[in-house]
Amino acid sequence: MNPDCSIFIVMGKTDPDGSDIRRQQSMVLVPRDTPGVTVERAMKVFGYEDHSHGGHAEVVFDHARVPVTNLIGEEGGGFAIAQARLGPGRIHHCMRLIGMAERAIELMCRRAVSREAFGKALGQQGVVHNWIADARVTVEQLRLLVLKTAWMMDTVGNRGAHTEIQSIKIATPRAVVDIIDRAIQLHGAGGVSQDFPLAELYAGARTLMIADGPDEVHQRSLARRELKKYL
């Protein structure tokens, strides 16, 4: 939806009957003003719209045609191009998630020392102690795993870090959603309102359990790789 976006990168099947499912897709450059291309509507995520960058959109391609020279790389190379980007992209998502968790912990602590319930500060409630301590331990664990994954990407590349990339993609969004959820709980009705950033943080973190491949796909692939060690 960004008005400055004048060229779309479209990935689609160019050989749907090909024997190798990883060679069925290609990427092609499609100018926004190509006849048959219609930006149908802006899409919201959990009710939020990314106004700063334009956000996502539903795009309709109705007999849109571009020259074959607009192909990126070679025909059938779309999946490989996507995978080359997804490894670093998943690390980037997990780095951002750790930042979200840190913000949630900060808000949780500030709320705990400033708000009273049943005659004493929330920070004096035992369950709140547990939430804050568990959140800190979890974030430090995730930070080390993401750092290891980034180091492996630098030293052995995307394929060599496959297990670690999938591990952080499974573990980080799930854990951060839980941390933000506890922070929302501590803020009560305010936590789900526009007065605090927690609801928007929650929407972003929960979305990343789907973006770049849902958790279940990564779990299946990771489990298969582990099982191969014993066959």
Image: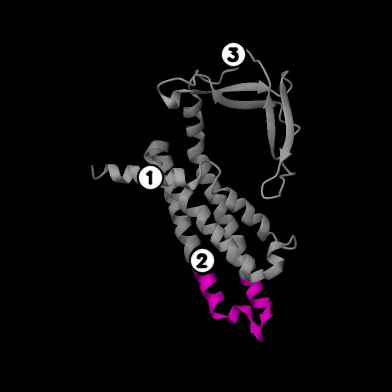
Residue at figure coordinates x 39%, y 36% from the top left: 159
Quick check: 115 above or below 164? below
Residue at figure coordinates x 59%, y 48% from the top left: 207
The residue labelled by disc 2 is 136
Q: Amino acid at mark 1?
A: Leu
In the drawing, does residue 103 fall left or right of residue 40?
left
In the drawing, does residue 229 fall left or right of residue 41?
left
Q: Earlier in the sequence, mark 2 or mark 3?
A: 3
Quick check: 9 above or below 196? above
Query: Does residue 20 belong to the magenta stretch?
Result: no
Q: Secondary structure at mark 1?
A: helix
Q: Amino acid at mark 3?
A: Thr
Quick check: 211 above or below 202? above
Q: Is residue 184 visible?
A: yes
Q: Secondary structure at mark 3?
A: helix
| Badge number at residue 222 | 1
Tell me the crowding category of disc 3: few under 14, some 14 to 19, or many 20 or more residues within 10 angstroms, Cα based. Answer: few
Image quarter where the C terminus lies is top left
Which region shows up in magenta?
Answer: 109-135
